[in-house]
Image: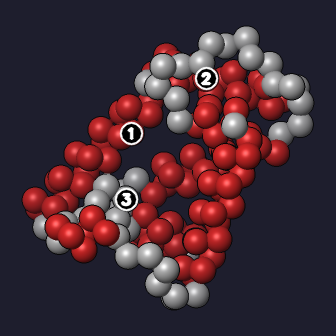
Amino acid sequence: MSDTSEPRPKVALLSILLEKRKLGWVMLGGGLVYFLISLTGIPLVTCSFKETTGYDCPGCGLTRSSTAILHGDWQTAFSYHWFAPVFMVFWAAVGLGLVLPEPWRGKFLNVVRKSERVTWWPVFLGIGLVIYALTRNVVGG
C-alpha cells in the first residue's frame, strides 16, 4: 500500500494515474502500442478535431515530434510540437511511478501529489497547450 500522507490535489493528473494503477497501466500501455505502431508508418487514428475544423488540436503532432526526438532530430521535433519533451517526461514519470517498489512508490506519489497541489502544473500545462494550438493555427504553423 502506498503512503498517502499528502492530500490529493484539487487538480490531479499524474497522481491519478499512479493511484489508479490499472488505469495508469492501460493508458501507458495503450500509448506505447499506438506509438510503436506509428513508428511503422501505419496511420491508426486521424484527428477528428482537425478533420472537422481544419485546425490542429492541442495534441496534433505530439507523436511525430516524439519520434523525431528519439531519432535525435530536435529541429524537426519542435516543428511538429513544442510540448513533446514535456509529454515524454510525463509518460516516463508514469512508468517510473508504476514500477517503483514500496516504499519508494509511496514517496514518489507524495512528491507528485505535492507538486500538483502546490504548483497546479496540470492546469498550466492545459492552458499552455490551448494557447499553443491557438497560436500555431493563427500563425499558420
Task: Identify the residue at horizontal 73%, vertical 29% (top origin).
Answer: 108
Q: Quadrant of residue 71?
A: bottom right
Q: Quadrant of residue 33?
A: bottom right
124 with respect to 117 (left or right): left
Residue 9 in picture, x, y percent from top left:
53, 19
Q: Is residue 68 something one can see in this rendering?
A: yes
Quarter the C terminus occupies? bottom left
Task: Identify the residue at horizontal 24%, vertical 55% (top origin).
Answer: 133
- Tag 2 and tag 3, C-beta contact below 8 Å: no
Quarter the N terminus occupies? top right
Residue 90 in picture, x, y percent from top left:
57, 46
75 with respect to 138 (left or right): right
Q: Is residue 141 something one can see in this rendering?
A: no
- Residue beneath disc 1: 125
Label 3 and label 1: CA atoms lie apart by 12 Å
Q: Name the residue nearer the viewer: 117 or 21.
A: 21
Residue, far right? 102
Task: Identify the residue at horizontal 22%, vertical 45% (top origin).
Answer: 131
- Residue beneath disc 3: 59
- Label 1 amino acid? Leu
Residue, far left? 138
